[in-house]
Image (spheres, rainbow, N blue to C red):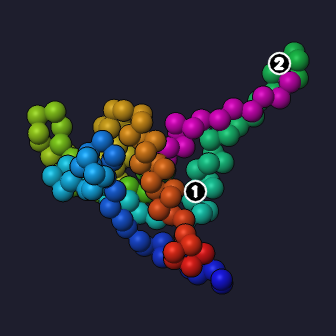
Amino acid sequence: MAPIARDLNTVFDYQLRVDRAPDGATDPTKTIFELQVIAHRVRAEIQDSAIFAEVRRGSGEQVVHTRPAMTEARLLEAGVRGWRNFVDGEGKEIACRTPEQRSLLPDLLGDPDYVTELAEAISAGSQVDAAEGN
């Protein structure tokens, strides 16, 4: 099958597993994140920026380090376009109007597992799958 182009303007809804109904269906009363497809180039830049090498003094040994948590935070920054029904501990809606507000999402979520889940959803949603033609 011939490759097809991915629409980079595609936005899709995603709800964390913890907020879904017991049968896995979306619960419209809980938080729904609006995620955007990100280009392969952007994802590659994010992943590449999380890897760096250093040479240890004395031994000259080269050591490679990764920063997976920073990769996830940057994926959220690139792929989250908004949210609905996201409230604080007092039930007050948290605004999502600017990129700066969206960049705070990893801190607002609190649980690193939620950050990981959203980052994985963005990555998965940015792939063209067999059903779409690739």
**Quadrant assignment, res 19:** top left
Q: At 11% from the left edge and 39% from the top edge, which residue is drawn?
A: 91
Q: Nearer the viewer, mark 1 or mark 2?
A: 1
Q: Amino acid at mark 2?
A: Arg
Give neighbour class at mark 2: few <14, some 14-19, many 20+ (Cα, 10 Å): few
Please say whether residue 118 is visible from this viewpoint. yes
Q: Amino acid at mark 1?
A: Arg
Quarter placement of the C terminus = bottom right
Residue 85 among those drawn in magenta: no
Q: At 83% from the left edge and 18% from the top edge, which residue is drawn?
A: 57
Q: Position of residue 114 (x, y in %)?
A: 38, 40
Secondary element under disc 2, as helix, strand or loop, is: loop
Q: In the image, is residue 1 above or below residue 10?
A: below
Q: Write down the region rendered in magenta.
A: 61-74
Residue hosting label 2: 57
Q: Position of residue 120 (x, y in %)?
A: 48, 50
Mark toward the start of the polypeptide (1 vs 2): 1
Q: Going by the image, does 91 lie left or right of 51?
A: left
Viewer-closest of 32 and 94: 32
Quarter placement of the N terminus = bottom right
Please say whether residue 31 is visible from this viewpoint. no
CA separation in Å, label 1 and label 2:
33 Å
Q: In the image, is residue 103 above or below residue 90?
A: below
Q: Going by the image, does 112 lie left or right of 62?
A: left
Q: Going by the picture, which residue comes out furthest to the front?
A: 23
Q: In the image, is residue 43 above or below residue 7?
A: above
Residue hosting label 1: 43
Viewer-closest of 19 and 100: 19
Secondary element under disc 1, as helix, strand or loop, is: helix
Q: At 11% from the left edge and 34% from the top edge, which residue is drawn?
A: 90
Q: At 54% from the left edge and 43% from the top edge, which residue is drawn?
A: 71
Report how many numbered discs are placed on residues in the image.
Answer: 2
